[in-house]
Amino acid sequence: MIRIPVEVAIVITTPEPSADDTALLTRARTGDGSAIGELYAIHRPAAHRLAVLLVGFDEADDLLADAFARVVARFTSGAGPTTNFHGYLFTTMRNRHRDLQRRGGHEEPASDHPWLLEAAVAPSEDTSEDFDTDLAAAALASLPPAWQQVIHLLEVEERTVAEAAALLGLRPAALSSLAYRGREGLRAAYLDQLIKLAPARTSECDWVRQRMSRYVRGTLCGSSVARSDSHLLLCTTCAPLLGHLRQVNGKFRFLRLRSTSADRQLAG
């Protein structure tokens, strides 16, 4: 049974545009500092909750501040929203988040060090939620055979990249790219196993949860992101699950998968 932090079980609502809001926006577009401050105070609570959904609590303030500053900066050139400030701000936050993810989404070369879930790093002090071995085995088994094979060679057999490439008849660069895809696939597959532990309440919940691992990993794009955002802003069961997945996702870089059962699954 997964543990869902209480603090992320929140309902997110967004205010509808009002006459007062439009008047504030008109003043803000002229550079009125007090109007800009009032707009920020009005829309910060809902915008901050969206930021938490996108990047988690630790980075939410930075994303919100960056997006708000970008919107206000557009006022000086006569651009930016003339109505519906909160909708424009939310769109800016989502676009900025996706832009940062794309910049950080370059392929990392495989190394000769153990890396089943991430490059080998000293574990964090909080190891209360190590990876579940049965879920890990299920995640590994769900991967395409080629990904399982490269993970087996590099992690279980502890082959070097050059050795694994020679065994598979690939160049080291191609092996490194395959290893990257396998590693990313394993992370997403592990999140999918966690999602299965929390039954969906509605058909829309089910639709979102089928894509939630990619949402968390930043590999979901287009209209699917917008639809997921809309659901997660309001759903009191999916939003807490998302918070839990973000916590697990954040530990991939600190915790290695210590799983004899997963090794046997690969070796079989």
Image: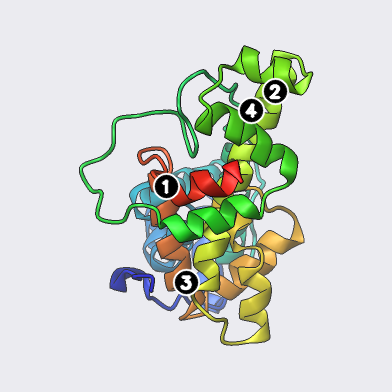
Which label lies toward us, 3 or 1? Answer: 1
Which of the labelled discs sits on residue 107, or is there none?
4
Which badge, 2 or 4, is on the more N-terminal residue? Answer: 4
* Residue drawn at 56 percent across, 69 percent down: 22
Q: Amino acid at mark 3?
A: Ala
Q: Nearer the viewer, residue 242 or 170?
A: 170
Q: Secondary structure at mark 3?
A: helix
Of all residues shown, which one is farthest toward the front? 268
- The label on residue 239 is 3
- Residue that carries the numbered disc 1 in the rendered image: 259
- Front-most of 266 and 100? 266
Residue tagged by mark 2?
A: 175
**Crowd rating for badge 3 (residues with CA inside 10 Å; few <14, some 14–19, many 20+):** many
Q: Nearer the viewer, mark 4 or mark 3?
A: 4
- Residue 213 appears anywhere in the view: yes
Residue 160 lies left or right of residue 243; in this view the side is right
Which residue appears at 63% of the width and 46% of the height?
185
Which dot marks residue 183?
A: none
Q: Earlier in the sequence, mark 3 or mark 1?
A: 3
Whether 130 is drawn above or below 84: the answer is: above
Which residue is at 45% across, 29% downward?
A: 119
